[in-house]
Image (cartoon, rainbow, N blue to C red):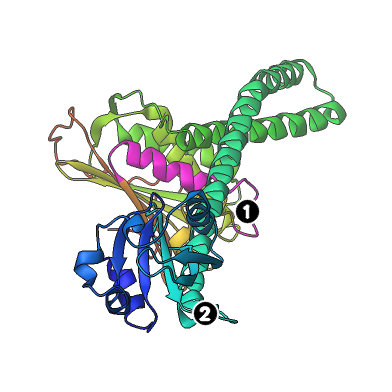
Amino acid sequence: MRPTFQAIAQLIPDPLLLVSVDGGIAGANEAAARHFGTSSGQLEGQPLGELFRVDDEVREYLARCLRSTAPHAGVLIDRRRGERLTCDGTRFPEQGSGLVVLRLSSERARHFTLLTQKIDALNREVLQRREAEAQRERIVEDLARAVRLSELFVAVVGHDLRNPLGAVLAGTALALRRVEDPRVRGPLERVNRSARRMQRMVAQLLDVSRLRLGRGLQLERAPLDLCDVVRQALAEAEQACPGHRFDLRVDGACAGEWDRDRLEQVLSNLLANACQHSGRGSTIGVRLSRTDSFARVSVHNLGAPIPAEVLPTLFDAFTGSATSTGLGLGLYIAREIVRAHGGEIDVESSATEGTTFTVNIPRGATAVAEPGLTDTTGLVDDDASEPAGAAS
């Protein structure tokens, strides 16, 4: 006997039969056994036709009970006594069971009994759960489809914008070389800066699209000295942020196997972020060190600390702060580039120590044990002391 039917059968004093739609008895309670003068075990497995006259009308009644969760009234005629028994039949609430519960009585009940109420409640709960699950799956599929379409759209638009932006940059660069009139050069320089900013945004969107579509970031690894990469990124940051001072501390040479352009992108994002969130005239500290297996670059700035509630999602896409001038993708892409190299990027921030981003990346197969050189030459200010909070 099925556990659910057994639990229901213990609550109901009337004879109960669990019947398959083809007329086989799958279960019976003790009241049914007493009614037919046998045991519940002997009733199980018997055809319904052994107890009642089964005709097309009875088969249709069982099929009707199976199609609906609402109890249906019917009449069965006892084959031995010729007695007419009324019954309330309803679908048994188990997925794929194809079973009907029949409650037998000598006269038609005016109201639903405890049996019909319990089974109806179970059936409704099962149906509601199935409908809720189906609806949830439809919503998930729709959202996944919408997200994929949006990412494909961004990828296509970003790809198509590169050519016209390139033409704008080439045109303004050519015009700036040939025009000396400051009234003309001013607007041209603004157009050129805006186009370069758009070019960076498009590149970021294309990187995000590749990541979201599962293509990952392609790396072109080559042996290089990370010191050169850091100095190049600082030179560009000095031009982009003339109101800041930069202090570089290098703890020995640092050779490895990395993608130069991608690491420059990481450093540019971190330096731009430090400039944006520190006061004009403040010093941005950059420290480069290495071990036998890893290289470490830290970028430190003083200023308002990153709120504690922001830290868990700081490296997520499109989570720029209220003062951000970009798309909120710089730190996200920086993290993904570092991870593509097999490394990690972390941040520490407090009101007293400032904010420090630290990048740790494996040096790769070409890492060698360089001589223990110590270069503490500042890129901008040779005499500046190491800024507080810089990573050791």
Q: Nearer the viewer, mark 1 or mark 2?
A: 2
Q: Residue furthest front?
A: 81
Q: Is residue 260 left or right of residue 112?
A: left
How many marks do you count on the picture? 2
Q: Is residue 57 left or right of residue 358?
A: right
Q: Nearer the viewer, residue 43 or 213?
A: 43
Asked if the stretch drawn in magenta spans residue 381, the answer is no
What's under tag 1, amino acid-wise? Ser
- Residue placed under numbered mark 1 in the picture: 324
Residue 194 against residue 269 in the figure, above or below: above
Asked if the stretch drawn in magenta spans residue 337, the answer is yes
Q: Is residue 309 left or right of residue 346?
A: right
Q: Is residue 314 left or right of residue 192?
A: left
What's under tag 2, amino acid-wise? Glu
- Residue placed under numbered mark 2 in the picture: 107
Q: Nearer the viewer, residue 347 or 86?
A: 86
Identified at 25% across, 65% down, the residue is: 43
Q: Position of residue 63 (x, y in %)?
A: 50, 52
Disc 1 versus disc 2: distance between alpha carbons? Answer: 78 Å
Mark toward the start of the polypeptide (1 vs 2): 2
Describe the element under mark 2 as helix, strand or loop: loop
Residue 351: give its label.
Answer: none
Residue 57 against residue 52 in the figure, above or below: above
Q: Residues within 10 Å of mark 2 (few under 14, many from 20)?
A: few
Identified at 83% across, 29% down, the residue is: 182
Q: Residues within 10 Å of mark 1 (few under 14, many from 20)?
A: few
Residue 253 against residue 79 in the figure, above or below: above
Is residue 266 visible in this depiction of the protein?
Answer: yes
Identified at 57% across, 45% down, the residue is: 143
**Magenta stretch?**
321-343
Where is residue 390, by image quadrant? bottom left
Identified at 66% across, 27% down, the residue is: 157
